[in-house]
Amino acid sequence: MILKQFNELKEVLSKPQQIVIIGHKNPDGDAVGSTLGLKHYLDKKGHKAQVLMPNEYPDFLHWIPGSETVYRFDRQNNQCVKSLRKSTMAFLLDFNALHRVGQDMQNTLEKYEHDFALIDHHQQPDDFEYMYSDTSMSSTCQMVYNFIEMMGDVDMIDKNIATCLYTGIMTDTGSFRFRSTTSTTHRIIADLIDKGAENDKIHSNVNDSNTYSRLLLLGQALSNLEILPEYKTAFITLSEEEKHKYSHEKGDTEGVVNYALSLKGIVFGIIFIEDEEQGIIKISFRSKGKFSVNQFARKYFNGGGHDNAAGGRSELSMEGTIERFKSLLPNYKNELLTSYEN
Ligand code: 5GP
Ligand code: MN
């Protein structure tokens, strides 16, 4: 755990500030929940807080309280630049290094004249003026709860804040099932329900928003699934053509990788998704047990994340990427076979 200059930050926040709160590119439930949860809290404390996201996030996160106030850097560039210009400090939530916001926004943030405050649970964070980093945490939302508690303000958590934070803890823990879910996570979740988070509605808003075409896309993904039992590995591919055929929209492939890992005996699940616009294959890695997909993604696929959930990319074709991926597995055979015991 790193807690850097917290008392100084508390001092800064004792006077009204103009604050921007920034999430990572392709924001997920934890990014949206933590940024908006923190925004509601800071506004309530008398600051003016504005959430900025690099780009769009999926429809199933648009119901989150305050979502309509978010500025997107790729679409509302002027508003974003203006907010940054008049701000007195910036929070960075749910990411560990400026490049995670994408090239355009990174270029702008690198010229930022005020201090950054990081709250994040990813490994190996870059250094910023104020930091609260803890890789043992289930989610950045759980850390925002802790942050508010450290500020002595846990009583200020209202229904909106509770709803935002519940959402991110839920999505980042796979609905409270990953190893990062601790008894403390459950205690915080219990408190958030007491403070007004409607747990049944939140689950439904996030999970029951399938369109018919999304289910068909999932069907395609599942029929592309390939199992490599000798490595306890299973992977899924989706080509641009297949995405197009089922009118793919942002967020449609979210969670699909978990189907690979849901197979009995599989400890390493991967999805390779062709992204024509970026000219890459976007990869999600998931594992069970000791095998670190963070290290694997960092070493071979220009990515990273957590021990059991990481992302990366490949500039090769789909076929080339799969071939390269398969050629790496023999080096990890032993690690994979002993990664997880039931
Ligand atoms: P996902 O597979 O859902 O995109 O990402 C899984 C986890 O890995 C998330 O916590 C995400 O923040 C992280 N992650 C995804 N892509 C990258 C990447 O390119 N670099 C790094 N450092 N982390 C990533
Ligand atoms: Mn997160």
Image (spheres, rainbow, N blue to C red):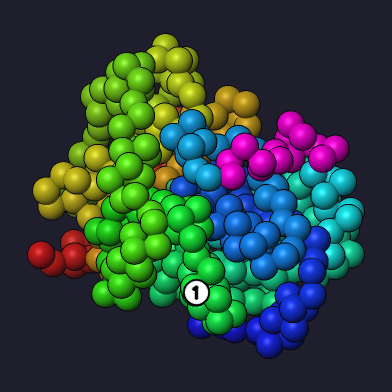
Say if residue 85 shows up in the picture: yes
Give the x, y percent position of residue 113.
Answer: 89, 64
Give the x, y percent position of residue 1.
Answer: 51, 82
**Is residue 240 rendered to the left or right of residue 173?**
right
Residue at x-position 46% and y-position 55%: 159
Give the x, y percent position of residue 162.
Answer: 45, 58
**Is residue 68 rendered to the left or right of residue 209?**
right
Q: Compared to 46, does 205 lie above or below?
A: above
Residue type at tag 1: Val
Q: Nearer the viewer, residue 111 or 57?
A: 57
Magenta part of the chain: 66-79
Q: Compared to 90, does 200 lie above or below?
A: above
The residue identified by callout 1 is 154
Residue at x-position 76% and y-position 47%: 105
Q: Nearer the viewer, residue 69 or 77?
A: 69
Q: Compared to 125, does 312 lie above or below?
A: above
Q: Nearer the viewer, residue 63 or 74?
A: 63
| Residue extending farthest top | 245
Give the x, y percent position of residue 179.
Answer: 28, 66
Q: Compared to 63, does 112 lie above or below?
A: below
Magenta segment includes 247: no
State which quadrant residue 16 falls in.
bottom right
Magenta segment includes 75: yes
Residue at x-position 31% and y-position 50%: 199
Say if residue 93 shows up in the picture: no
Mark 1 Cα shell of 10 Å, populated few (<14), some (14-19), many (≥20): some
**Is residue 215 rendered to the left or right of residue 232?**
right
Residue at x-position 31% and y-position 38%: 204
Quadrant into which the C terminus falls: bottom left
Dot 1: element = helix
